[in-house]
Amino acid sequence: MKNEQIVLAHRPEGIPQDDAFRYEQIDIQEPGQGELLLESVYISVDPYMRGRMYDVKSYTPPFQVDAPLEGHMVSKVVKSNVSDINEGDYVTGVLPWKKFNTVESQRVTVVPSREVPLYLYLSILGMPGMTAYQGLLQIGKPQSGETVVVSAASGAVGSVVGQIAKLKGARVVGIAGGSEKVNYITDTLEFDAAVDYKKDDFKDQLAHAVPDGVDVYFENVGGEISDEVFKHLNKFARIPVCGAISTYNDTKPDIGPRIQQTLIKNQALMQGFIVAQFEEDFKAASEQLSSWVQAGQIKAEVTIDEGFDQIPNAFRKLFTGDNFGKQVIKVASE
Amino acid sequence: MKNEQIVLAHRPEGIPQDDAFRYEQIDIQEPGQGELLLESVYISVDPYMRGRMYDVKSYTPPFQVDAPLEGHMVSKVVKSNVSDINEGDYVTGVLPWKKFNTVESQRVTVVPSREVPLYLYLSILGMPGMTAYQGLLQIGKPQSGETVVVSAASGAVGSVVGQIAKLKGARVVGIAGGSEKVNYITDTLEFDAAVDYKKDDFKDQLAHAVPDGVDVYFENVGGEISDEVFKHLNKFARIPVCGAISTYNDTKPDIGPRIQQTLIKNQALMQGFIVAQFEEDFKAASEQLSSWVQAGQIKAEVTIDEGFDQIPNAFRKLFTGDNFGKQVIKVASE
């Protein structure tokens, strides 16, 4: 049994190509006292990781060149040197992109239930679901009858945002690219309307979809799509700013209409957040999300690619719009 | 005794020139039941009025072409047909730019005290002071030891923002144009630092003035000045967006760096507001502001021009940076 890892070969410009990633054969480390040996099973790729490839100060430290990339994953316990975690248990955590990780047990959490598919702990029952829940409810605060617009609406976060907003009684409009995603949003997720940003008549479609204006805009994409949404804000609109994926690979400055006059005119609030800041609410939120999932009130689309060698490609798909729902990579059997 | 009014002759482009205003001789209307006849004494010109000259939906309806402009003023009661307001009283309200107004008594408020100069009811004890107080304390929420930056810092709102922030224990940095204003901010208002945006080394001055970053940025100006401040935001920074005066006369779109990535990176909040939304706190706030003024803890610089014919010119000075502190026009003796 050999180990393998993926390191950042150099800081990429634009969408990271294969040469930004380097595969390395390494040894498996024996776990010491208080440690676990874990086999990676499902690895998550998430848009925020692109930010960590730049050498800039942000809410998470940058990845180091020649060091392994890391992200959320579900792993199987191969050996345990702690009493409360057993061989065969499944755990989640933010760990290096290795086939086998040897870590202190505090770095991971045992999954609370195996009644749901394990990969859901990387989507609706993991960081993306929690991000959707906290951003929407703590900042967006949708009220019954209000209009909520969400961009990247078929994605891991956006799809959950819209479904929670529906449960709260809002009228929900999703923005996505391509007819497959647009149909999924209205037919499967049952949003009230969906708008295709790739269509020439996007602006008209959007205006038509929000006849009463926009009370909450959950921002995932940034750029010109959002510029257009901002034209429809209502008084006291709230804009949780979760991401700006359309700009993450930009090699030029992100230039567009400044937002100040729009915010004043609508007495609107715009707040950037990362999910960690709402940590004190995680326990209650997890229970709520689990109960919605188990009752079938929230659906989670997951795209599962297979193979440790597929991780860079799966990561790229986040930015090209070629994935659907939450993107994970299965790198070992359960 | 003849009456006179100033109407909007046409919707101006850029800074309103004289031809945007038309003076008209009109009659004085006798007050009916429940009405007052008022003589305008101090007339206020405020930046937000520029927005009302555009024919766009906003938080206040646009001025109508050929109708009188209107704004805050202090007036003297010439005749009263109501029991609780007497001839010789002074009142404030938002009224048409006329030498004499005949209005229902509900449209005005008797000034609470004559122990302070009357024109202060158009500045620190009026809308600008209340705007500073509410925006800073309800959105900015400065904590002791934090760094507060305010733009247009020698102006009617900015000067009060900075002084309240000082009273709350913050380190306060003002941005203004020209050495006279910069010196006023540090010497008279006792801000911790002042930065001159007209200087070539503005960026360096700013960086030097905020060694610990920016926790609250009270936004009055927009444009490139603010773009530069945003580079220094701290985690959980708050940005009350009060105005964007540098852009009010723009004839081209207001283009610059989009704000989304900055807000995410710093988990920062940006909120547009107008003072009216905090109405339920006005009474308590007025008492607090009065007590600070009477104790000499807040100073209010007022520029008083004289003559009804000087109103358009005084209004223009708001945008050219030629006024100092709050700009009012005295149009009759007290």
Image (cartoon, coloured by chain):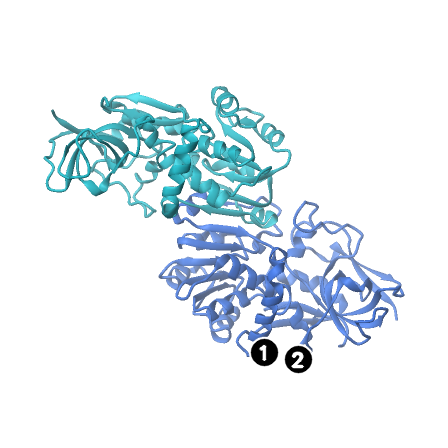
Chain colours: A blue, B cyan
The amino acid type, in three-letter code, at marker 1 is Gln
Q: In this view, does B292 lie to the left or right of B112?
A: right
Q: Where is mark 1, residue-wise? A: A294
- Mark 2 Cα shell of 10 Å, populated few (<14), some (14-19), many (≥20): few
> Taking B34 as reference, is A146 left or right?
right
* Callouts 1 and 2 close, C-beta under 8 Å: yes
Q: Is mark 2 on a helix, strand or loop?
A: loop
Chain of the residue on which disc 1 is drawn: A
Q: Residue A52: give x, y in percent of width and height.
A: 69, 52
Residue nearest the observer in this picture, B125 or B304: B125
Q: What residue type is labelled 2?
A: Glu
Which quadrant is the C terminus of chain A positioned in? bottom right
* Residue B117 showing in the rendered view: yes
Residue at the spot of label 2:
A115
Q: Which residue is drawn at 52% across and 30% down?
A: B174
x, y percentage for residue B321?
A: 42, 26
